[in-house]
């Protein structure tokens, strides 16, 4: 079974939000599996405290950011197909700075969707999954975590990684079966 690894935006968790640095890499590269060429380190992200005060362990944005404890856990589980870049969060109203997070870039995307069993629509002349998804295990192979070539840009994990993440109860992290995806 496969799962999307997402930021849990479905519950009110008082999670602070942030504005990622704006550059040509922001939208196109961080969530497409493309190599990031030497971003400015550390990445400076402006916090938006009006949305909350709690820090998530995973911010699933145009520049995905994970806590050090989630990254260390993924590495402990044998995940090694990503790069990480230190992030400094700055709070504009108090000038406080927070560390312990990194932007993550999972390398590559994989065409693993079984279109005969998945819900999709055509978008820019390509299939785009917008409902329940079925993955072909032969195409996935033994990848522990990856992004799909078509459809939502969420990370996909298998049973072993999903269960390990759920046990740790990370803050604002959602592990959602891909077959339960509703397009949101």
Image (spheres, helix red, strand yellow):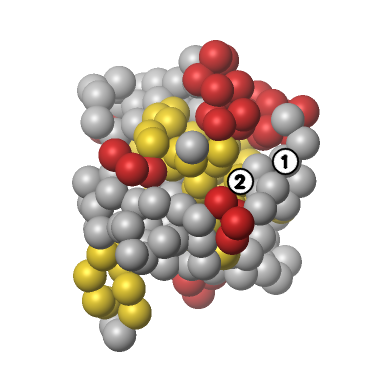
What is the distance, in whole Å, between disc 2 and disc 1 at their CAs?
7 Å
- In the figure, is residue 136 to the left or right of 19? right
SS class of the residue under badge 1? loop
- In the figure, is residue 7 to the left or right of 146? left
Q: Nearer the viewer, residue 72 or 2?
A: 2
Where's residue 84, x and y in %?
69, 48
Where's residue 93, x and y in %?
37, 34
**Picture quadrant of residue 62:** bottom left
Reply above or below: 83 against 128. above
**Picture quadrant of residue 139:** bottom right
* Marks 2 & 1, CB-CB < 8 Å contact: yes
Residue lying at 36% horizontally and 65% vertically, measured from the top left = 115
Reply above or below: 77 against 82. above
**Which label sits on residue 145?**
2
Which residue bears the numbered disc 1? 79
Reply above or below: 144 against 14. below
Where's residue 15, x and y in %?
35, 27
Residue lying at 67% horizontally and 68% vertically, measured from the top left = 35
Residue lying at 32% horizontally and 58% vertically, measured from the top left = 117
SS class of the residue under badge 2? strand
Q: Is residue 6 visible?
A: no
Q: Nearer the viewer, residue 56 or 175?
A: 175
- Mark with earlier residue (2, 1): 1
């Amino acid at each position: 079974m496969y799962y999307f690894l997402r930021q849990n935006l479905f519950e009110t968790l008082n999670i602070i939000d942030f504005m990622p640095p704006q550059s040509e890499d922001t939208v196109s590269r961080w969530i497409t599996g493309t190599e990031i060429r030497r971003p400015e380190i550390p990445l400076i992200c402006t916090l938006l405290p009006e949305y909350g005060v709690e820090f998530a362990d995973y911010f699933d944005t145009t520049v995905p950011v994970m806590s050090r404890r989630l990254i260390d856990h993924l590495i402990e589980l044998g995940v090694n197909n990503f790069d990480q870049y230190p992030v400094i969060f700055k709070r504009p109203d108090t000038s406080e700075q927070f560390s312990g997070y990194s932007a993550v870039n999972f390398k590559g995307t994989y065409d693993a969707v079984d279109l005969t069993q998945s819900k999709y629509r055509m978008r820019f002349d390509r299939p785009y999954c917008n409902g329940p998804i079925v993955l072909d295990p032969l195409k996935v192979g033994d990848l522990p975590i990856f992004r799909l070539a078509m459809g939502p840009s969420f990370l996909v994990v298998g049973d072993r990684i999903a269960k390990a993440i759920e046990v740790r109860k990370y803050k604002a992290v959602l592990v959602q079966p891909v077959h339960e995806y509703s397009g949101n």
